[in-house]
């Protein structure tokens, strides 16, 4: 919006607010409380519609979304969390005072209405109102004044307005709740136990990411918001739980973009006595189950670029994908030659990067985003994943997959490393001499014997994006992180 239009909107908003305050004062003078108490309902609006019986008496409540005056009668639409329903107010039924008082009801007000169900001449189910109650006066103009609230930043910052104005947004978050419900149902049905592990941790482990720091006054200790629950879930494998999962919130003090938010939802699953293949089958069956239950099939994404999830899903080694893009001789190149080739492919490569860093930049910038149909990328370099088991036939790669769909990593899965001596070596190499970054308590747990296991993480927000066709992670998080205005 231009500076002039912003100023105009503020002025108009202030004028509407003054008028609504005047309407509130008039209603209170007429005996209507501006902000009432509880209003018991017969049912929600969608349920009243589903169980419609002409002549039945009902009590309903909701936000006034439309008013259509017709002389001595009027129609209005109420909306609650389940849907909309029409109400009809007639002067000779309500009485002069109640009918005239409704003239001071504004769009956006919350009201209760008691009356009888009937159908109009056009066949629309309607409540003929015998009495109405003001439940909450809206002092601000509703989103319709902004043409359905199309401004993206306003939609994210004031999600409550987005939900009021855009039914498709409501439906997306209803589907998100259904996705979470089906994830739980699927895993519970296969004998997995849902658990909870700490969000505030003395060490931020389980992934390579920058954590948020805080301070715990009672313990006089620096603490971290978790970047992953992995190390605590593996402690549970040591303790004897052999199938566990957690739907958790993770926090990473990193950038914002279309597929990253610093606070996000992950599913992590661990199956004792399994391996990579165990969780590879599991994640495919899980996603297909959720898609079928929530979307109604295996074709997902936006209509203009649908994605077919029908199995079998492609499986390809990481190195093969690199060679397809960077050349069949990539593995034989020295660092200097690899840097020149990558730069020639349009990549910005710092001088201090080694061959593995250059290779992974090629993967992230030139390979991953091209993988639209479900693809398991396997056998990644061991330097990238310190918590996975090395492949028996090649210690330079680990027994992992990254499931990529629509150009985004949806789920990584591992054959988990359960050797405490090897884990210590990797932790120490990762810590680069800083002993405080080595999780000694986790290593102690491993020394008690963790069974071989398959582990898998699933980005829930990205799965919701995939199944609902959303283009940005902010579209599937109710209150996404935003930069300060003017920042």
Image (cartoon, helix red, strand yellow):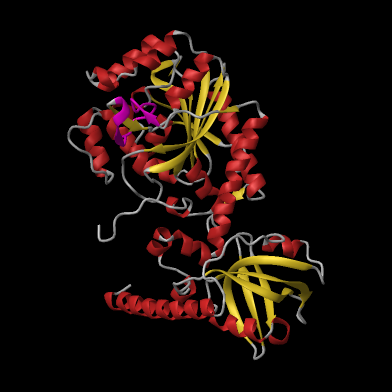
* Residue at image point 39% right, 64% down: 154
Relative horizontal placement of residue 346, taking residue 400 as reference (left or right) = left
Q: What residue is shown at x 32% (from left), y 77% (from top)? A: 5
Residue 321: x and y, percent? Answer: 42, 35
302 and 240: which is toward the camera: 240
| Above-or-below relation of 352 to 75 | above
Nearer to us in this view, 75 or 277:
75
Determine which quarter of the picture holds residue 398. top left
Q: How many marks?
A: 0
Please state the horizontal and vertical placement of residue 208, each as a whole percent of the image: 34, 30
In-front residue for pair 481/328: 481
Q: Give how far across and how far down residue 168 sits, in percent.
A: 56, 61
263 in relation to 123, above or below: above
* Most distant residue in the bottom direction: 71
Query: Which corner quadrant holds the N terminus?
Result: bottom left
Quarter of the image that includes the C terminus? bottom left
Q: Which residue is at the far left?
A: 351
* Residue 55 in which image quadrant: bottom right
Q: Is residue 12 shown to the viewer in this render?
A: yes
Residue 65 pos. (x, y %): 57, 73
Q: Is residue 212 magenta?
A: yes
Residue 475 magenta-drawn?
A: no
Judge whether residue 310 can be spotted in this image.
no
- Residues drawn in magenta: 200-219
Task: Please report the residue visible at 73 percent of the width from the left and 83 percent of the height from the top.
Answer: 93
Using the image, determine if residue 394 lies above or below residue 167.
Answer: above
Which corner quadrant of the image does residue 51 belong to?
bottom right
């Amino acid at each position: 919006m231009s500076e002039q239009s912003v100023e105009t909107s503020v002025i108009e908003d202030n004028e509407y607010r003054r008028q609504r305050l005047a309407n509130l004062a008039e209603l209170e003078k007429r005996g209507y409380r501006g902000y009432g108490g509880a209003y018991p309902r017969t049912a929600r609006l969608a349920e009243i519609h589903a169980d419609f019986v002409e002549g039945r008496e009902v009590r309903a409540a909701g936000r006034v979304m439309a008013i259509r005056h017709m002389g001595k009668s009027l129609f209005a639409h109420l909306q609650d969390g389940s849907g909309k329903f029409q109400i009809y107010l007639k002067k000779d039924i309500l009485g002069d005072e109640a009918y005239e008082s409704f003239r001071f009801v504004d769009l956006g007000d919350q009201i209760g209405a008691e009356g009888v169900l009937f159908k109009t001449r056009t066949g629309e189910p309607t409540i003929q109102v015998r009495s109405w109650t003001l439940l909450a006066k809206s002092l601000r103009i509703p989103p319709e004044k902004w043409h359905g609230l199309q401004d993206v930043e306003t939609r994210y910052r004031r999600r409550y307005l987005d939900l009021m104005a855009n039914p498709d947004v409501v439906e997306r978050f209803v589907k998100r709740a259904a996705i979470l419900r089906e994830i739980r149902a699927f895993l519970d049905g296969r004998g997995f136990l849902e658990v909870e592990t700490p969000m505030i941790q003395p060490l931020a482990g389980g992934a390579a990411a920058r954590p948020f720091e805080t301070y715990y006054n009672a313990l006089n200790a620096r603490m971290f918001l978790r970047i992953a629950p992995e190390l605590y879930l593996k402690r549970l494998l040591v303790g004897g739980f052999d199938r566990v999962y957690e739907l958790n919130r993770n926090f990473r003090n990193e950038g914002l973009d279309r597929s990253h938010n610093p606070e996000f939802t992950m599913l992590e699953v661990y199956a004792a006595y399994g391996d990579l293949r165990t969780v590879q089958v599991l994640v495919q069956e899980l996603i297909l189950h959720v898609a079928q239950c929530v979307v109604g099939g295996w074709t997902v994404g936006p209509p203009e670029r649908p994605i077919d999830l029908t199995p079998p899903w492609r499986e390809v080694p990481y190195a093969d994908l690199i060679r397809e893009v960077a050349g069949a001789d990539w593995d034989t190149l020295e660092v200097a030659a690899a840097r020149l080739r990558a730069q020639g492919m349009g990549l910005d490569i710092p001088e201090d990067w080694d061959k593995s860093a250059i290779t992974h930049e090629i993967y992230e910038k030139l390979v991953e985003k091209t993988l639209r149909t479900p693809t398991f990328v396997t056998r990644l370099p061991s330097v990238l994943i310190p918590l996975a088991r090395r492949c028996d036939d090649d210690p330079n790669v680990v027994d992992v997959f990254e499931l990529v769909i629509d150009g985004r990593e949806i789920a990584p899965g591992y054959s988990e490393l359960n050797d405490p001596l090897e884990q210590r070596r990797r932790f120490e190499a990762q810590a680069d001499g800083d002993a405080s970054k080595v999780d000694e308590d986790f290593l102690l747990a491993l020394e008690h014997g963790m069974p071989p296991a398959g582990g898998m993480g699933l980005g829930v927000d990205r799965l919701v994006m995939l199944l609902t066709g959303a283009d940005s992670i902010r579209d599937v998080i109710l209150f996404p992180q935003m930069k300060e205005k003017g920042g």
